[in-house]
Image (cartoon, rainbow, N blue to C red):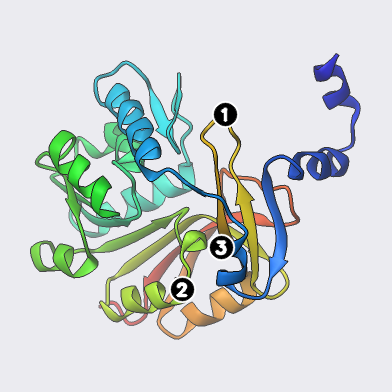
Amino acid sequence: MVNFIKKILPRWLKNMITSFFYGWSGNYKTWEEARAKCSGYDSHVILEKVKRSVLQVKEGIAAYERDSVIFDKIHYSYPLLASLMWIATQKGRRLNVLDFGGSLGSTYFQNKTFFDPLEEVNWCIVEQPDFVKTGNECFTDQRLHFFYSIEECFKLYQIDLVLLSSVLQYLEKPYSLLNQIISTGVDYIIVDRTPFIQNRDRITIQKVNPKIYNGSYPCWFFSEAEFLEKMKGHYCKLLEFEALDKANIPSEYKGYLFRRNLIP
C-alpha cells in the first residue's frame, strides 16, 4: 500500500512530505543560526560505519561504498572518471590527486580498476584527524595516502589535481578553502556532487536519512553564477556535468572540471 501511494503522488508533494522527516529545509541568514538548530552527529559512529563499509570494498566483499552505504555494483560517475583519466594522459599516465574530504578512499576504490594500469598514482586524502588516523592504520598503501592538511600533502607530492566531491557545501567557509586551493596554483580542480541554485547562496539544514545514520547539520546551496564567477579569473571551465545526487528543494547537483589559466 505504501509503495502504491508513493507511485501516485506527484514529485513535489513527495518532496514536501519527505522534508518533514529528512532532507534539506530552511533558508538561514548565517551558518551559526543554522548550526544552532542542528542536532549534530556522532562522528565516531559515522567513522566506524564508513570503516566497516570501505573494508568490505577493499577485501572484495562489497563492490562499492558511498557515504558509508555499500552497494552490490559500482555506480560510476563517468564524467568524473573521464576527467581523471584525461588528466592522467596529460601527465604521462600519472595521476597525483589531492582528494579533500575524501573519507577513507571512496572515490579511489570506486575507480581503482581504471587507475591500476597507470604508471604512477598518488591519491592523497586530506580529512578530519580521526579519519586520517584510521586511514593510515587500515588503508594506506603505495598509492593511497592520508594527510591532516593541504600543506602537509603538497610538501610530499607534486599535486596536479584537487578533487572537491560533496565537501564544499558542508564547510562553514567554503570560499576560503577554494581560495586556499587556488593559491597553490594546482593545474586542475574538479568540483563534483555539489548543489547549485539560480538565486543567491542559501544555507539550509540537512537531516540525514536515518537508514544511513542519525544527524543533522548546515549545508550550503551555491549560486551557480557567483561560484563560476569566482573561478573565472583563475581557471577556465572545461567540462560541466550532472552529478549523482538529488535534493528535495529546487536545485541541481553538478560537477565541473576546471583548468588553471595559462597552463603551458
User: Distance between the Cα atoms at labels 3 and 2?
Assistant: 13 Å
The residue nearer to you, when weighing 164 against 204, is: 204
Q: Where's residue 64, x and y in %?
A: 40, 28
| Badge 1 element | loop
Q: Is disc 3 surrounded by few (<14), some (14 to 19) or many (20+) residues within 10 Å?
A: some
The residue nearer to you, when weighing 61 against 30, is: 30
Residue displayed at 29% across by 41% down: 104
Q: Amino acid at mark 2?
A: Lys
**Which quadrant would residue 181 be assigned to in this image?**
bottom left
Q: Amino acid at mark 1?
A: Lys
Q: Amino acid at mark 3?
A: Arg
Q: Which residue is mark 1?
A: 211
Q: Is residue 94 left or right of residue 214?
A: left
Q: Is residue 258 left or right of residue 8?
A: left
Res. 93 visible in picture: no
Q: Is disc 1 surrounded by few (<14), some (14 to 19) or many (20+) residues within 10 Å?
A: few
For the C terminus, the quadrant is bottom left
The label on residue 173 is 2
Residue displayed at 17% across by 62% down: 153
For the N terminus, the quadrant is top right
The mark nearer the N terminus, 3 or 2, is 3
| Badge 2 element | loop
User: Distance between the Cα atoms at labels 1 and 2?
Assistant: 29 Å
